[in-house]
Amino acid sequence: MRISTRAQRIEPFYVMEVAKAAGALAREVAHSDRPMIFLNIGEPDFTAPPLVQEAAARAVRAGATQYTQATGLDHLRERISGWYKQRFNVDVPARRIVITAGASAALQLACLALIESGDEILMPDPSYPCNRHFVSAADGKAVLVPTTAEERFQLTAAKVEATWTDRTRGVLLASPSNPTGTSIAPAELRRIHEAVSQRGGITLIDEIYLGLSYDDAFGQTALAIDDNVISINSFSKYFNMTGWRLGWLVVPEALVPVVERLAQNLFICASTVSQYAALACFEAESIAEYERRRAEFKARRDWFIPQLNALGLNVPVVPDGAFYAWADCTGFAEKLGISGSWDFAFETMKRAHVAVTPGRDFGTAQTAKFVRFSTASSMAHLQESIERLRAMAENRAQ
């Protein structure tokens, strides 16, 4: 059977390969005194709050399970618009919001609508691997631009200008970012968008962790810049609805019918039950619960990052959002006779029964030195993982 070149361009998602190995080992040690602790997957340990679950059940009981329009329930689009106004004081008309089958569908729709074969999209290195594969699936090319800790592992306007060529179509950013949890300063983001706009390009920004910001200096939406910024968002992270597969896309008004036409053909619509459930996300009781959970994620970060640093797993930039720690494992690994983050991840899995994600997925600019820890797990699990990592180092030293 002949496989398309498009499919062959898509690399394995190594995060999931590591997860499979961790799952297999977890089954072996499930009944031991040290069951596997999973700090490798970016999924909140919280589930949808009660009002959201109840809204889903009501929708099923009422038979509200048929197709919606491709752009989503009007009421849900209005609720999201209201959230932007209430949370960020930004006016985002509901007519510019398209409900999608997760942020993945939003990214696919945006890329298919805007990228021609051979177009190049600038992205920071490191960055979330699936984002560059959405570009590739639209027959474009992701160009990874190396970044530094001093740049918060984000693109800068100067690097966008220096890297831009005749083939460049635009940029795909993420703020806060996976794997680093760092955001782009609003002033720098404006400069990036200005540089892109002056060259006739597009600014795509993944904002799925936007609600999980811990610093007012960064916790702002790029949609405040102007109506030409295209934002991808999701109910998975801040709203704790990962498996519900629901997201949204904010586009310039002229692009809405284009995206709608693509969505009609590729997805028909997002899950109707999930959409009705998501209406309850914006109730005062739900927002209060989400804010309580955000404070818990911040508390985990504030405890865990210093512990990693003390172990020699240096986190060069304290994340201002999301639930990740991007740690340089070089010194820790060398003391254990381990070379590189890939081997370190598997040794940590075997010796300490702690699953982490090696940097391999996220780019090529020094990513072999880094591992990503997810702090989406409970504080108890984070504390136990630190104890196991400390014991792992001490046992080797003996």
Image (spheres, rainbow, N blue to C red):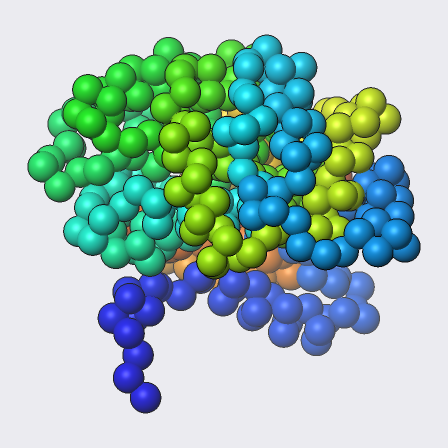
**Nearer-the-camera pick, 390 or 234:** 234
Q: Residue furthest bottom?
A: 1
Is residue 209 toward the left or the right of residue 54 in the image?
Answer: left
Q: Tell me the residue at 70%/32% (across/down).
A: 75
Q: Residue at the spot x=57%, y=69% of the render?
A: 20
Q: Is residue 170 visible?
A: yes
In the rendered view, tell whether residue 27 sits above or below residue 118: below
- Percent x, y of residue 127: 38, 42
User: Closest to the observer: 86 or 365?
Assistant: 86
Task: Tell whether 270 sits left or right of 274.
Answer: left
| x and y percentages locating residue 186 in the rendered image | 42, 15
278 or 291, nearer to the observer: 278
Q: On screen, 343 above or below 333?
A: below
> Which quadrant is the N terminus positioned in?
bottom left
Q: Which quadrant would the C terminus be assigned to in this image?
A: bottom right
Q: Position of residue 268 (x, y in %)?
A: 56, 56
Residue 169 in the image: state x and y as whole percent: 22, 38
Q: How many numbered discs?
A: 0
Residue at point 61%, 51% (across, down): 270
Query: Is any atom of residue 378 visible in this view?
Result: no
Residue at the left extreme?
166
Q: Is residue 50 above or below residue 284?
A: below
User: Is residue 295 found left or right of 167 in the rendered image?
Assistant: right
Residue drawn 33% across the image and 24% down it: 151
